[in-house]
Structures are given as structure tokens and as C-alpha cells.
């Protein structure tokens, strides 16, 4: 099948419906970065079942839906459809009828993906398997995206194995094997759970049988308890009626007493109310008298406080007069100080004015002297600078010549030393070259070692095949052994389950008689039908129900003609002799119906199918096996299993011997393979060491020759430098000797420097005198200004002192007047106090009279309230007695109702019918209540001591037995399914190993050829590493580009690694061609020459394999080689568009034009 068309709608940046034709040959996709080219590849990967949003460059799968731009709204749906040409009918059977298959994947935001094949909805697994069977898929190596070449280069060997799996076409095989392994693990888990359930149910069945024996005794005790409870409840009902009548009489007496006490309480309440009405006026009068007394007392306290305040004010005024006198004295002193200071400042001002006379003339004379000394000093300093500069230049020239001579002499010494060193090294290299001959290892020896390495690798491959064959035999015999062991385990498990099911537990004191019976196979149902539940009865006479041993009948009635006694086929305890002698076996239901009329009392007929015909006409049809029949059948089954297990154990021993032999052979083959691998590795290492030794020798010889050439050139340059340095020394010495002497110039400079020093001292003295005069003038001016300021300040202080004296005098007069007024206030207060004391005495007498009257009335009220409380307490006690009696009445009624309810719940009858249960008549004497309670308690204790009792134990035991048998059958089916799954997985593994090894050889062959074709020479091969099992092994790539030794691909350069990985991918295509190959900028790391070889190789593979190539590229060389080009543009921001150009058709049009 071929891919023909890819349609997109709403997928990432392709918001509009877009169609990409995938035609034979090479189709190129071009466009600027970021325009959406890779979205086409991701759409192809997505429609083939990609489930990882991360590989779609998104955080969630909804990110593949167009998310909107500034001009276009977001979409809620994305759809991609891939069309496949099925004209050759190579599709799976479900889709093989159509000429074209369309695979569609549709996603709706927040709703997940939907897959369709030809319009029918399918699972994602179905789509993935469809493409896996075509040697492609979402994770196929045929889809080479950006960085995938680098990922293949950097991958571990175990990660590269998937390349071989695709080449072998077992990608789908892996999926199916994984699915089968999951089903196998689930089946094994179900098997374990089933075993646990069966064991639990078998334990439960034993428990149910014990419970069934307890149920009979439980029912008997429960019947006695019911009669005892009926008697006890009837006695309680009679007692409760008597108690109810007595409580009703007591209630009438109590109600009469409450009515009498209520009348007494009413009289006391009236008296209390009358006294209480007199209290408010008396309290009001007492409160008014108390208030008046309080006001007078407060007025008295106020007068005392007012007197204290008047005396405090008088003291304050006297203190203020003293303070004012002190302030007047201070201000007068301040005025006198101001007069003295103003006079002193006036005298100092006159003295300074006299000192300022002649100040200007002295300053001008000093300035003229400074200017005169400055001019002379400037002239001499100029002459000194010129002389010093000339001397310095000559000194610098002399020093420069001396330094140059020293430097040249040092350089000459270094050059001469370097010349000697180079000469010595050249002589040593020449001697070493003469002493060393040709390289130790010749090319012929290396080729011979390489041939031995190739032979070692071939031996390794043969050992691998032998090991694979031995492991195949080992696996087959292991499967046979495991199958037998499983059968043996199943039989052992069934045997163990039956033993547990049929075993008599220690705590079962009365084992049933069925465990002591032996019955021939096929007669279990007959025995079960004949005895029924009687087989569960023990023969121990200590049991509540048991089989008693009796002598055989002396005159036994013969069974009808045509039937045999059951005792011919059953062997049991003597207690069953009588029953067995009267049971006959018939061959069919017709015989049973026919002979039924001939049976005498006690006789019965049974069939092997479980039919029963009893002398009294009771008939049970065949096909309904009883629990006893099932137990007997299980015992016979247990004996058959024992014989089968013994035979199977012998077969398992033989199979184990065969497996151990095969396992030993496989180990020997594995050891031989490992030895071969070790020999191959040693041969490769020897070749590697020989190549490295030879390369180092050649490299050392070339390096030595290059070094000799460089040394000769260095000697010539050193000789030239020595000659030039000697000439430079001679020229510098001659220039130094030709320079004139410097003594006269230095003496002239010294004389000028001495004159300049004298002139500088004279000029400094003139400047100091001038500055001193200026400083004195500034000081006098500043002091005059300060005197004016101080004089003004003292004048202001004097004025302020006079003003303050006037204010203090006025204030002293005001305070004197206030003091006289304050001294008169205490006398007025004394007169007011005497009048107020008289009023207070009168008010106290009135208040005492009102308080006495109030106290007398309150005492009377207290006595009355005491009598009222006593009456109320008596009434409350009477009412409480009435409530208690009412509670007794209600309790008696409730007791009667509870007894009635309990009789309904327990006995299902009314009180008048309770005596019928215990067979007592109305009026008959009842037993003592204590005696019946003791009997009831003893019966309940006896029933409780039995513990929990399951009354449905017999029915549940039958149901459980049926379930166990069903599960045993299901277990057999499950074991058979597990065996089939293991066989299927083994078959898949065997097929996978064979196909993988075959693919490895073919891929390795193609890889060797393509490597030479892409590199123009060299060698390369593939190797399986890390495991002896091809399905678990890693893929290692060894390469030797032209001119380089054989080495791991990771040690090659970047371009060499890219070409090597490309060779491997194309080798896979040649081995198992995929319908399509996508190359996303694979040519990016290659130069133009490698790109040409790459494009040529792609064209050859496309022509030979029929694979359609879809190539995304930016390289002009690759574009020129395409048969058609699709351009991806983004004219509108965030929206990709597709345009196409058929280059082959364009060339035809151009040639025809």
C-alpha cells in the first residue's frame, strides 16, 4: 500500500482545509523558518496514532487544534485524513475490500480523539497496528524529524534496537506479544485468585457441615425457650395489671391532698400582698428624708472645701507679691548694666577710628614693592628653565644611547645562545633519523590480523546461530516440562482440595457415617438417593442423633426380581446392614416404576442416576444428585486423581531429564558463543593496537621531518639576526662618543638657580608685609561693625528693662487688691456653717422616724413570706407525690404495653392467647416467677453457649459444593488458556528472533554498502551487544571512514556521525521498505558534496524500493533534485498555506517551448 494524500483542517497553523499530495519519487517541502513545515510531519505522525502531547510540541493534545490569531478565532475541532492506495489488496482482511483506505483522526477540544477507517469508528490500537504492519507508524524510523539523527547517534545500543525491529517488520509483533503477556499475567492472577477462592470455599464448606448439625439442636432448645418466655410474659402481664390498679387508687388520694394545700397557699398569698402594698410609701418617705440629709451634709462638706480654696488663694497672692518685688530689682540691675556697656563701646569705637588713618597709603606702597620683585623673579626663572631644558635633552640623548647599547648587546647574546640550541637539536634529530629504520609493523601484517578478526566474527555468528538453536530446543522442552508441571500442580491442587473437602476435622467429635462407607464408582448417586441426609448422621452413641448397630433381620423380605441389593456395591459399618439389605438397584426409570408396586414395607429401589422409589409411593426422579452422592463421587475422584498423579510424576521426571540435557547444551552453546565473542574482541583489539602502533610510528617520522625543516629555517633566521645586532651595537657606540662635554652648561644652570632662590625670598617677604597690612585693616573694620551691633543690642536691653519695670509695678498693685478681698472670705464661710449645722440636726430626726416605720413593716412582711413559703413547700411536696404516682400509673401502663408488644414480637399472639402456647387453662395455677426465670435463663445460656448457628447451613452447603465444582471446571479452562498463551508467546518470541537475526544480517549488508557509497570508501559494520538474546540485545555501530581506523560511531566527527546514521536508516529502508519516508532537514549538517551524494542515494532508494520520500529542506542542492516542491507560506500571521510546483512537469514544458 502507498500513501497518496494527506488532508488537514484546523490542525495547528493549517486552519483552512489543506491537501498535500504524496506522489512517487521525491517531494520537497520548503519555506522560511516558523512557517509551519514541521506541522505537516506532525500531522502525519498524529494521524498514525501518536498519543504523546509532548512529541507534538504541546502541553496537552488539545494544543494541536488551531488556537486563533488576532484576526481569526480559535477552532474547537481539528481533523487529519491520510489516504492509502489499496489497489493491490494488501490491507488487513477487515479493510481489504476497498481500493482506497482513508484513516481519519478527529479531535474536539476537551473531548478527546476519535479514529475512523473508511468512515467507521475504530480503536487507536487498530490504527497503530495497521501502520505497524506496514513497517511505519507514529514512532517509525521512517519519520526522521529534526534532531532524530542526533538522537540515533547519541542513543544507547539498547535504544537503537527498534531500528532492527522495524527492519524485521516485528513492530506489530511486539505489540501483539505485549498484549498477550498482559493477558497471560491477568490469567495467572485470576488463577491465583481462583485458587484462593476455592480454598476459602472448601474451608467454608467444612464449617457449614458442622453448623448443620448444630442447627437441629438449636431448633429444639429454641422451642423450649419459646414456651418458657410465654409463661414468663404471662406472669409479668398479670403482675403489671395489679400494679396499675394500685397506682390508680394512690393517684386519687394525692389529688385530694393537693387541692387542700392549694387553698391554704392562696390565703397566705393574699396576706402577703396586703402588707407589701404598705411598703412603697414608707420607703419613699425614708428615701426623701435621707436625700435631704445627704444634701445638707454635702453642703457642709462644700463649705469646708470652699474655705480651703480661699486660704490657698490668699497664700498664692502673697507668693506672687514676693516674686514681683524680686523681678523689679532684677530689671533695675539690667538697666544699669546697659548704661555701663554702651559707654565702654563708645570709647573703643573712637580708638579704632584714630588707628585707621594712613591705612590706604601704606597698602599701596606694599603692593608696588610686590610687583617689582615679581617682574625680576619671572625673568630669571625663564632663563633658568631654558638652560635646564637644554641640559636635560643632552642627558636624555646620552642615556638613550647607553640603554640601546645594553639592549642590543643582551639581544645579541640571546640570539647566539638560540643559534647554538637550534644547531644542537638539528644534529640530534638527524642522528635519530639515521638510527631509526622503517616502521616496526608492516601493512601486510595489519591486513592479516584484520582477516583473522573477520574470521573470528564469522565464527561468532555461527556460534550465535548454534546458541539460538540450542536455546530454541531448551525453550520447547521447558514449555513441555512447564505444561506437565502445571497439569501435575492442577491435579495436586484438586487432590488437596478434595482431601480437605472430605477430611474429618479434629474438632468434629461425631464424624458422619458417610466417611466410613466405600462405594464402587458409578453408584454414588444411587447411595445418596437411598440414604439422603441419613448419611450425615454419626454412628457414635454419644451424639444427639446417631445410627445404632442392630442385628440383621432373621426373616428378611426378598427384593423384587430384576434388581440387585445395593450392598453388593457398597461396604459400610454394621449399623447400615439392615438399611442396605432392603435397597435394590434398577437399571432404568422404567424398571423402577414397574417394580414399585412389588415393594414391601421398608424397601426402596434406586437407580445409578439417582432415582428413588420407596415402598410408600415416594418417588424422586433421576438427575438430581444429593450432597451425599456428590461427596461419594468426590471420594472416588480422589482415588482416580492419586493414580493419575503417580503416572504424571513419572512423565514429569522424564521431561525434566530432557530439559536438563537441553539446558546443558544451551549453556555449552552460550559458553562457546561467549568464547567466540571474546576471541573476536581480542582479534579486533589486536588489529586496533597494530593500527595504532603503525600510525604512531608514521606520525612520529613525519613530525620529525617537519621539525628538521623548521629548525633549518630557524638557523638561517638566527644567523641574520646576530649580524644585524652586532652592527647596531657598533653604530650606537660611535654616536655616544661623538657628543660634546656637559660641565660648562651645568655650572651656568647652578648659578642661575642660586639667583632665582634669592629673588624668590625677596618676593616672599614683600608679599608677607602686604598681606599683614591688609589683614590688620580687615580686622579693624570687622571690630567697628561688631561695636555698632553690640551698642545697638545694649540699647535695646535698656529699653526692654524700663518697659518691664512699668508692667511689674502695675501688676503689684492688682495683686495687693486681690489679697485684701481673699482675706475677707473665711469669715463669711464660718457664718454659713453655723446655720447649716442646725438644719442637719432637724433632718436627721425626721429621717430616723421614717426608717423606724419602714423596719416595722418589713418585719411583718418577712413573717408573712415565711408562712407562705412553708405552705408553698407543702404544696410542692404534694404535687411531687402526685407526679410520682402519675409516673407509676404511666409506667404500669407502659409495662403492660411492652409486655404486649414483646408477646407479639416473640410469640406472635395477644396476652389472652399466651396460655395456649404452654398448654395451660384459664385459672390454672401458674408456676413461680423465679423458677420460670431461672429455667428461661438456663435455656438461653445453653443456646448461647452453642455460639452462632447458621439455620441455612444445609442449603448453603449444597450451593457451595455446586460452586466449588463450577470453579474447579473454570480452573481447568483457565489452565488451558494459560498454556495456550504461553505457547503463543513462545511462538512469537521464536518468530521474532528468527526475523530479527535475518533482518540484522540484511541490514548489516546494506549498511556496509551504503557507508562506502556515502563516504566514497572506508568500512563499517553492525554488532549485537549487551545480551545473548537478539530480542534483548543492543545495536552497536562500528565505522572506519577513509583514512581512519575502525572505531565506535560516537568517536567520529559531527558530519561523519550524521552520514553514518543516515546510512543505517537507509539500510533499514532497503531491508523492509516503508510506504513513505519523511526527512525533516536531515541534510542540514552536511556540506554540498555530501548533500549531492545524499540526494543521489535517496533517488536510488526511491527508484529501487518504491518508497515515497517527503523531504523538508533549506538546501538549494536538495531543492534542485526534487521532482516536485510544496511551499509553505505564512502570508497571514499564524496561518499556514500550501502552494505546489511540479518540477518534472515544468522541465517538460520548458523543453517543449
Image (cartoon, helix red, strand yellow):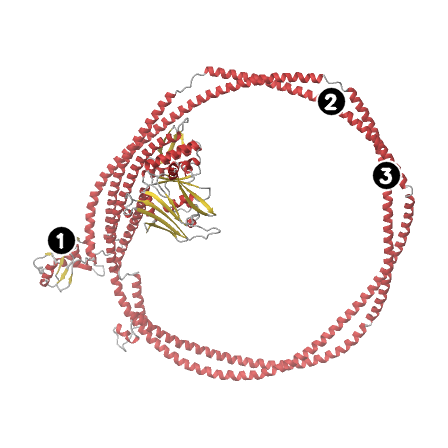
Residue 295: horizontal and vertical position, in percent?
71, 76
Above or below, 743 against 800 in this view is above
Hey, which quadrant is residue 1014 in on the image? top left
Structural distance between the alpha carbons of marks 3 and 2? 46 Å
Above or below, 92 against 540 in this view is above
Q: Which element is circle 1 on?
A: loop
Structural distance between the alpha carbons of marks 3 and 1? 161 Å
Circle 3 sits on which residue? 772
| Labels 1 and 2 touching (C-beta < 8 A) | no
Circle 1 sits on which residue? 569
The residue lying at 48 percent from left, 82 percent from top is 261
**795 relative to 482 in the view: left or right:** right
Circle 2 sits on which residue? 394
Instruction: First in sequence, mark 3 or 2: give its number.
Output: 2
Between residue 472 and residue 399, name the one nearer to us.
399
Task: Report if residue 1031 is visible in the image.
Answer: no
Amino acid at each position: 500500500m502507498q500513501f497518496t494524500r494527506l488532508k488537514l483542517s484546523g490542525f495547528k497553523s493549517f486552519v483552512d482545509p489543506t491537501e498535500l499530495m504524496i506522489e512517487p519519487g521525491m517531494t520537497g517541502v520548503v519555506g522560511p523558518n516558523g512557517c509551519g513545515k514541521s506541522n505537516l510531519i506532525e500531522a502525519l505522525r498524529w494521524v498514525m496514532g501518536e498519543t504523546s502531547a509532548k512529541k507534538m510540541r504541546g502541553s496537552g493534545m488539545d494544543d494541536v487544534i488551531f488556537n486563533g490569531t488576532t484576526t481569526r478565532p480559535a477552532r474547537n475541532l481539528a481533523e487529519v485524513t491520510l489516504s492509502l492506495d489499496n489497489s493491490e489488496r494488501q490491507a488487513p482482511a477487515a479493510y481489504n475490500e476497498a481500493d482506497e483506505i482513508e484513516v481519519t483522526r478527529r479531535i474536539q477540544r476537551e473531548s478527546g480523539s476519535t479514529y475512523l477507517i473508511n468512515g467507521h469508528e475504530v480503536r487507536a490500537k487498530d490504527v497503530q497496528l495497521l501502520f505497524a504492519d506496514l513497517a511505519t507508524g507514529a514512532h517509525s524510523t521512517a519519520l526522521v524529524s529534526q534532531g532524530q539523527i542526533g538522537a540515533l547517534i547519541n542513543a544507547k545500543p539498547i535504544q537503537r534496537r527498534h531500528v532492527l525491529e522495524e527492519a524485521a517488520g516485528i513492530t506489530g509483533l511486539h505489540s501483539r506479544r505485549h498484549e498477550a503477556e498482559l493477558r497471560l499475567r491477568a490469567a495467572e492472577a485470576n488463577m491465583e485468585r481462583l485458587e484462593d477462592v476455592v480454598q476459602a470455599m472448601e474451608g467454608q464448606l467444612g464449617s457449614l457441615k458442622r453448623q448443620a448439625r448444630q442447627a437441629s439442636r438449636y431448633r429444639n432448645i429454641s422451642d423450649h425457650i419459646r414456651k418458657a418466655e410465654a409463661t414468663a410474659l404471662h406472669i409479668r402481664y398479670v403482675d403489671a395489671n395489679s400494679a396499675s390498679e394500685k397506682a390508680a387508687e394512690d393517684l386519687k388520694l394525692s389529688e385530694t391532698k393537693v387541692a387542700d394545700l392549694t387553698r391554704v397557699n392562696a390565703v397566705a398569698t393574699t396576706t402577703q400582698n396586703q402588707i407589701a402594698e404598705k411598703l412603697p410609701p414608707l420607703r419613699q418617705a425614708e428615701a426623701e428624708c435621707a436625700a435631704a440629709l445627704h444634701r445638707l451634709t454635702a453642703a457642709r462638706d462644700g463649705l469646708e472645701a470652699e474655705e480651703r480654696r480661699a486660704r490657698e488663694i490668699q497664700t498664692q497672692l502673697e507668693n506672687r507679691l514676693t516674686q514681683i518685688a524680686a523681678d523689679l530689682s532684677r530689671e533695675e540691675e539690667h538697666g544699669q548694666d546697659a548704661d555701663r556697656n554702651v559707654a565702654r563701646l563708645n570709647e573703643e569705637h573712637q580708638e579704632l577710628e584714630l588707628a585707621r588713618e594712613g591705612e590706604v597709603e601704606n597698602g599701596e606702597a606694599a603692593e608696588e614693592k610686590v610687583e617689582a620683585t615679581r617682574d625680576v623673579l619671572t625673568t630669571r626663572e625663564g632663563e633658568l628653565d631654558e638652560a635646564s631644558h637644554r641640559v636635560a635633552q643632552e642627558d636624555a640623548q646620552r642615556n638613550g644611547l647607553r640603554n640601546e647599547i645594553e639592549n642590543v648587546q643582551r639581544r645579541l647574546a640571546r640570539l647566539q645562545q638560540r643559534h647554538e640550541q637550534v644547531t644542537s637539536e638539528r644534529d640530534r634529530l638527524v642522528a635519530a633519523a639515521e638510527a631509526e629504520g622503517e616502521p616496526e609493523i608492516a601493512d601486510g601484517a595489519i591486513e592479516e590480523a584484520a582477516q583473522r578478526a573477520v574470521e573470528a566474527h564469522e565464527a561468532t555468528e555461527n556460534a550465535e546461530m548454534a546458541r539460538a538453536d540450542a536455546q530454541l530446543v531448551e525453550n520447547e522442552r521447558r514449555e513441555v516440562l512447564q505444561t506437565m508441571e502445571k497439569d501435575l500442580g492442577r491435579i495436586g491442587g484438586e487432590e488437596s482440595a478434595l482431601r480437605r473437602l472430605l477430611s474429618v476435622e479434629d474438632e468434629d467429635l461425631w464424624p458422619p457415617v458417610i466417611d466410613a462407607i466405600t462405594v464402587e464408582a458409578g453408584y454414588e448417586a444411587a447411595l445418596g438417593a437411598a440414604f439422603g441426609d441419613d448419611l450425615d448422621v454419626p454412628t457414635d452413641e454419644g451424639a444427639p442423633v446417631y445410627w445404632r448397630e442392630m442385628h440383621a433381620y432373621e426373616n428378611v423380605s426378598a427384593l423384587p426380581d430384576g434388581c440387585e441389593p445395593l450392598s453388593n456395591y457398597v461396604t459400610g459399618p454394621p449399623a447400615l446392614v439392615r438399611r442396605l439389605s432392603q435397597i435394590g438397584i434398577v437399571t432404568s426409570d422404567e424398571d423402577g416404576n414397574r417394580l414399585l408396586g412389588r415393594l414391601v414395607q421398608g424397601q426402596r429401589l434406586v437407580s445409578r442416576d439417582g432415582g428413588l422409589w420407596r415402598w410408600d409411593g415416594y418417588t424422586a426422579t433421576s438427575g438430581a444428585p444429593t450432597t451425599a452422592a456428590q461427596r461419594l463421587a468426590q471420594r472416588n475422584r480422589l482415588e482416580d486423581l492419586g493414580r493419575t498423579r503417580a503416572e504424571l510424576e513419572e512423565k514429569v521426571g522424564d521431561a525434566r531429564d530432557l530439559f536438563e540435557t537441553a539446558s546443558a547444551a544451551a549453556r555449552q552453546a552460550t559458553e562457546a558463543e561467549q568464547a567466540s565473542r571474546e576471541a573476536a574482541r581480542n582479534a579486533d583489539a589486536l588489529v586496533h593496537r597494530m593500527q595504532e602502533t603503525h600510525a604512531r610510528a608514521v606520525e612520529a617520522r613525519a613530525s620529525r621531518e617537519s621539525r628538521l625543516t623548521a629548525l633549518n629555517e630557524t638557523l638561517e633566521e638566527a644567523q641574520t639576526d646576530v649580524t644585524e645586532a652586532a652592527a647596531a651595537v657598533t653604530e650606537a657606540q660611535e654616536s655616544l662618543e661623538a657628543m660634546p662635554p656637559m660641565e660648562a652648561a651645568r655650572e651656568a644652570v647652578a648659578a642661575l638657580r642660586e639667583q632665582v632662590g634669592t629673588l624668590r625670598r625677596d618676593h616672599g617677604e614683600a608679599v608677607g608685609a602686604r598681606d599683614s597690612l591688609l589683614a590688620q585693616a580687615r580686622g579693624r573694620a570687622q571690630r567697628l561693625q561688631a561695636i555698632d551691633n553690640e551698642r545697638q543690642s545694649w540699647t535695646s536691653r535698656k529699653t526692654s528693662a524700663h518697659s518691664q519695670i512699668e508692667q511689674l509695678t502695675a501688676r503689684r498693685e492688682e495683686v495687693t487688691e486681690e489679697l485684701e478681698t481673699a482675706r475677707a472670705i473665711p469669715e463669711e464661710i464660718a457664718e454659713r456653717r453655723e446655720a447649716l449645722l442646725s438644719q442637719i440636726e432637724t433632718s436627721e430626726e425626721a429621717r430616723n422616724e421614717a426608717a423606724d416605720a419602714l423596719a416595722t413593716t418589713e418585719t411583718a412582711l418577712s413573717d408573712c413570706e415565711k408562712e407562705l413559703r412553708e405552705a408553698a413547700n407543702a404544696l410542692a411536696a404534694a404535687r411531687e407525690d402526685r407526679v410520682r404516682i402519675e409516673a407509676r400509673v404511666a409506667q404500669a401502663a407502659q409495662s403492660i404495653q411492652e409486655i404486649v408488644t414483646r408477646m407479639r414480637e416473640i410469640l406472635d399472639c395477644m396476652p389472652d392467647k399466651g396460655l395456649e402456647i404452654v398448654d395451660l387453662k384459664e385459672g390454672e395455677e401458674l408456676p413461680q416467677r423465679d423458677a420460670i426465670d431461672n429455667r428461661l435463663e438456663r435455656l438461653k445460656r445453653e443456646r448461647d453457649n452453642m455460639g452462632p448457628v447458621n439455620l441455612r447451613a444445609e442449603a448453603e452447603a449444597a450451593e457451595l459444593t455446586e460452586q466449588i465444582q463450577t470453579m474447579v471446571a473454570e480452573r481447568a479452562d483457565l489452565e488451558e488458556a494459560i498454556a495456550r498463551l504461553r505457547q503463543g508467546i513462545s511462538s512469537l518470541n521464536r518468530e521474532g528472533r528468527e526475523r530479527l537475526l535475518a533482518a540484522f544480517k540484511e541490514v548489516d549488508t546494506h549498511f556496509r554498502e551504503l557507508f562506502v557509497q556515502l563516504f566514497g570508501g572506508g568500512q563499517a559494520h553492525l554488532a549485537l551487544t549487551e545480551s545473548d538474546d537478539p530480542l534483548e540485545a543492543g545495536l552497536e555501530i562500528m565505522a572506519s571512514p577513509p583514512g581512519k581506523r575502525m572505531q565506535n560511531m560516537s568517536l567520529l566527527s559531527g558530519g561523519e556521525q550524521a552520514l553514518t546514521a543516515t546510512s543505517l536508516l537507509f539500510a533499514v529502508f532497503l531491508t523492509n521498505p516503508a510506504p513513505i519516508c519523511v526527512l525533516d532537514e536531515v541534510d542540514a549538517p552536511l556540506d554540498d558534496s555530501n548533500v549531492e551524494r545524499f540526494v543521489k542515494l535517496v533517488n536510488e532508494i526511491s527508484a529501487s524500493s518504491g518508497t515515497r520520500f517527503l523531504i523538508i529542506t533549506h538546501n538549494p542542492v536538495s531543492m534542485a533534485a526534487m521532482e516536485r516542491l510544496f511551499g509553505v507560506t505564512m502570508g497571514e500571521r499564524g496561518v499556514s498555506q500550501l502552494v505546489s510546483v511540479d518540477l518534472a512537469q515544468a522541465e517538460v514544458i520548458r523543453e517543449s517551448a
